[in-house]
Amino acid sequence: MFIIILLLIFILFLTCHYYAQYISNRRLMNKIPGHVSYITLNSIMLGCGSREELWKILINFADQFYPIFKLWSFSVPLISIRHPNDLEIILKNTKHLEKGIFYDALHPFSGTSLFTSTGSKWQSRRRLLTPIFHFNALQQFTEILIEEGESMANSLKNAADTITKDLVPFISEHTLNAICEAVVGISPQKMGSFQHQYWTAVYRINEFIIYRSLRLWAHNDWIFSLTPKGREQTKVLKLLHGFTEKIIEERKIYHKHNGQYLRNLIKGTVATNAETIGIQKKRLAMLDFLIMASQENFLTDSDIKEEVNGFIFKGNETVAMGICFALSLLAEHKDIQDCARKEINTIMQQNQGKLTMKLLQDLQYLERCIQETLRLYPSMLLMARITSEDTQLQSHLIPAGAMMLLNIFGVHRDSNFWLNPEIFDPDRFLPENIQNRHLYSYIPFSAGPRKCIGQRFALLMMKAMIVPLIHNFYLEPVDYLKDVRMGINLICRPLNSHRIKFIPIATKST
């Protein structure tokens, strides 16, 4: 009898929970325009459809049901918003920090790093990691970025003639070199025969993340591990984590014997102190900040590995794609490319061809070109947030527990806020043209409490990699952006190859 009573209580509890969480939510969801169920979306989530197809569905619905629409993926409510007022309500609220199941695919690679963590862990990591992107640290990182940008340009110069490149693999290889050296102090370029293995592994991880994020069944690690892709992911993760653990251990041993050097390095007094105590100078890496935090018992080795892997993945993918789209747009708009080159040439002549962080910051026209690139092709097409409580938007009350899809791509091309939104026009970002613009109509680095911590680093990196290319080459399109195929992805990345020509200026001049 006692067991029956307990069972009845349990059933009653489940019924009440079902009513509170599902029936009431369904009532609120039914008031939002859109589709109660959509078989194509469900089939894609099961792994039977394509990312391109899902992207077209979301774009069409965003226009049809502007500015908000709903979808049900099985029992999961999805609500897409793109009006700046609604985006502001979600992004500014410190309670809506959870990113949702689409980001679970990152956990095997970078755990719950700053990019995916929530709650108190996210808050403490944010405070701890913010100094990494302060001015003094960025100065040393910028040296790395400038060197890799010059190396990339030199690899093209060696061809001594017009050369056509598929942008994504070409740019990604060099951004990965720069990111790895900035994060851990060594780039794949300096690994010898290991370089290609590491670059391929990082690229493969991106494929696994995309595959798993769009398939509900693949979110289960145990189920996924039994599949061929799951077994391949295990091998790739072993290689990447092995590299990270080895570098962390070597760096920790170095600092164990040179403890004062680490503190001087981070305080910016390394030049004089290194000479005084006879230590070989070592360039600052983000890893050094993490090691110092671990010495003060703020981070474990596992925490360090999470953040290192998170920085490498997020930094490389977002910056590489931003550079690819910027070069493509400049190739297709010769007048804008010429204006950018004129500014770059003036800066380079003033400093005998040597770039510095200050000079990169002074390139205001190039910065506007990058800003306009990120408007048309933001690093993140969509972001996801889980509502932690019932939330009132402009026109609808959103139930707690709903997954919000924040349509960055859509708001960046919304004709209500942008004149001729499909046109590439860097002058949109002249000071007089941005004064009265809604702050949440342009959010390439997100906004609110979870705004990208590395925004300044990303802009400096894009400039440092683009400058030597524009300075030394004319860019001409082979493939055109109108033909680029896009699909649902954590990162804005073309599905097909995209090529441009690099024509040496010296060759064309003669």
Image (cartoon, rainbow, N blue to C red):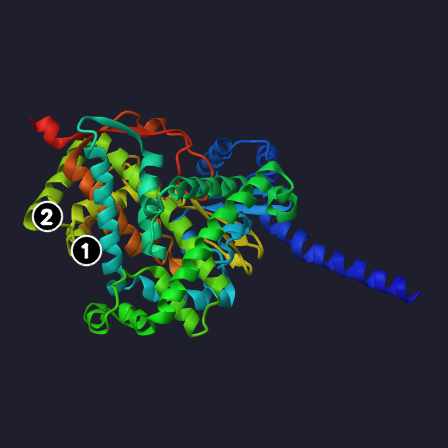
Residue 500: mark in rendering? none
User: Callout 1, which amino acid?
Assistant: Met
Residue 10 at what x, y percent from top left?
80, 61
Identify the residue shown where x is 10% and y is 40%.
342
User: Eyeballing the image, is 433 above or below 286?
Assistant: above
User: Eyeballing the image, is 87 above or below 42?
Assistant: below
Query: To which quarter of the image does residue 230 belong?
Result: top right
Quarter of the image that includes the N terminus = bottom right
Quarter of the image that includes the C terminus = top left
User: Eyeballing the image, is 460 above or below 372?
Assistant: below
Counting other residues with Cα less than 10 Å from the Cα at mark 1, is it few (<14), some (14-19), or many (20 or more)? some
Describe the element under mark 1 as helix, strand or loop: helix
Q: Which residue is mark 2?
A: 347
Describe the element under mark 2 as helix, strand or loop: helix
Precedes in sequence: disc 1 or disc 2 = 2
Q: Which residue is mark 1?
A: 357
User: Callout 2, which amino acid?
Assistant: Ile
Would residue 227 be seen by someone viewing this image from the given angle?
Answer: yes
